[in-house]
Image (cartoon, rainbow, N blue to C red):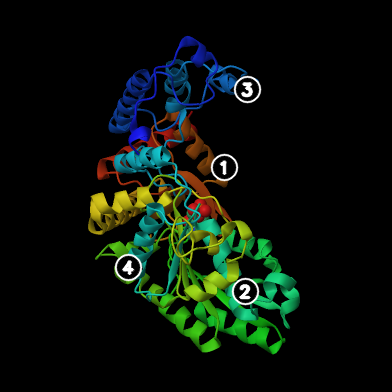
Amino acid sequence: MRELEAKAPLETPGDLERRTTLDPSDWRDFSRNAHEILDDLIAHVESIRQRSVWQPAPEDTRARFTRSLPREGRQIADVLDDVRAHVMPFATGNLHPLFMGWVQGAGTPIGMLAELISAGLNMNCGGRDHIGIEVEQQIVRWMREAFDYPEDATGLFLTGSSMANFLATVIAKVDAIGDATRETGLRSASRELIAYTSKASHGCIAQAMQVSGIGSANLRLVDIDASGALRTDILQDMIAIDRANGRQPFLIVATAGTVNTGAIDPLPEISMIAEGEGLWFHVDGAIGALAIFSDKLRHLVKGIERSHSIALDFHKCGQVPYDAGFLLVRKGEVHKRAFAQSSSYLQRADRGLPAGETWPCDLGVDLSRGFRALKTWMTIETLGAERLGASIAHTCELADYLAKCVRQSKAFELCVQPTLNIVCFRVRGEDDSINRELVLDLHESGIAAPSWTEIDGKCVIRCAIINHRTTRNDIDTFLSALESLLEKRLNP
Ligand SMILES: *Cc1c(COP(=O)(O)O)cnc(C)c1O
């Protein structure tokens, strides 16, 4: 050990020419550059409100990223200047309090710091005995606790809920027709497998059916009520018809927070139907699951604790930086049976680095994985579940406020009373195109960034208020900007 600690001799110029390591030759210079960019980033987030929500990248900036592969490197200071000039000003905009497009988290400074630490440690969290695995298990334990899942429930970080929903579909398939399906595919099924979800479910549910080999033609899209929630009477009928026709219902995917309107399917009723029919009950909680952190909102997701699995996104309402999707599975043993493999190069031992029985790579298709758990742990540890829950509740109050303002306005009409933090409305008495144009006008103005979607075949302006920085004032600013842009379009 002593010898290892001895200082390496200083490098001579000749050594420098022959350097093969990729570490900096001047650590002090590196440190100075690193501190400068960190300060710039902190200032960037602190002053986010003073900038445009979004601006398109100019041609010379786009041209910077069309160069050919560099043979030689450049000074770190030069590269960081490029980042300052050509990357930082042209980001998506989702940090800004008036970003309301799609459903995107805003991140936090603590999450930013966590990413720096993760990258510095550069751990591969696919498996083995190291602290990254323990940190991930802490989140698994917290999610078991939050959703009242049993001790043997398993959890796994993934890119996002799209992947989590896909994995859940595969696990439900293995549970329905047995492990043999891993080798023989759908030949293991004696009857056609059928899954159910609502018409308002996210497109990734249909994609999960496609990629799992079952096929999206075997996904029944159940009608929704006026709030956008799945109609259980119709679900029940559809299951009965499929059984009468000799098919095998195996999975119901309920949504807690639909992507278009934030509606929540009736989870307690769906759980009873799933139980009565012997079906896997999965909840796509990408938007709504973390409402469990809020005393005010928790009742909305009642019944989620009776599910077989839950997909959720820490990177949306949880404000953890991208990406941080998560899957929780009640029967950990089924989860493992769906994915675990035995490979000579991944053998376990009872000591040393290869220790540990179940590794994350046994629970999904990723082998190499980053340390998504650290930014989630640091976010929850620093802010606490209560404060995170309160920030979600606040976004829901803002959605109610916006809905109220829209209802009172002469220019706009509300499409659906919001359940969570998504508000959809349109210009009164005008066609689809003006709604779309208004959204784009707003983007280009740099003032705000909502998106649009379709409800009942009509284009509507959609505000997903996911950002913890948004205030009532911002909602007022947004509406008055929208009104004056509308005025300009109607009376040019
Ligand atoms: C965002 C979303 C998804 C997809 O999640 P990703 O994290 O983007 O992969 C799935 N379902 C719903 C309801 C969503 O809002």
Above or below residue 346? Residue 281 is below
CB atoms of marks 4 and 3 within 8 Å:
no
Q: Nearer the viewer, mark 1 or mark 4?
A: 4
Q: Distance between the residues labelled 2 and 3?
A: 44 Å
Residue 358 on image: x %, y %: 48, 66
Residue type highlighted by circle 1: Ser
Q: Disc 2 to disc 4, how far (Cα)?
A: 26 Å
Residue appearing at x 57%, y 71% in the figure: 171
Marker disc for residue 66: 3
Whichever of labels 3 and 1 marks the residue nearer the N terminus, that label is 3
In this rendering, would 89 be left or right of 216?
A: left
**Residue at label 2?**
173
Instruction: List the residue tagged with mark 1.
Output: 433
Quick check: marks 2 and 4 in contact, CB under 8 Å? no
Q: Earlier in the sequence, mark 4 or mark 3?
A: 3
- Viewer-closest of 243 and 442: 243
Element under disc 4? helix
Q: Which residue appears at 72% of the width and 86% of the height? A: 245
Residue 283 vertical placement versus 100 (above, below): below
Left or right: residue 105 compared with residue 171: left
Query: Could you tell me how far apart the alpha carbons at marks 2 and 1 are, in whole angstroms?
Result: 43 Å
Tell me residue 346's x, y (percent).
57, 58
Q: Is mark 2 on a helix, strand or loop?
A: helix
Asked whether mark 3 and ligand 1 are closer than 8 Å, the reply comes as: no
Which amino acid does the dot numbered 4 rest on? Ala
* Residue 129 left/right relative to 400: right
- SS at circle 1: helix
In the rendering, which numbered label is found on residue 146?
A: 4
Along the viewing direction, whichever of 180 and 214 lies nearer the viewer? 180
Mark 2 residue crowding within 10 angstroms, few (<14) / some (14–19) / many (20+): many
Can residue 385 be seen from the camera position used here? yes
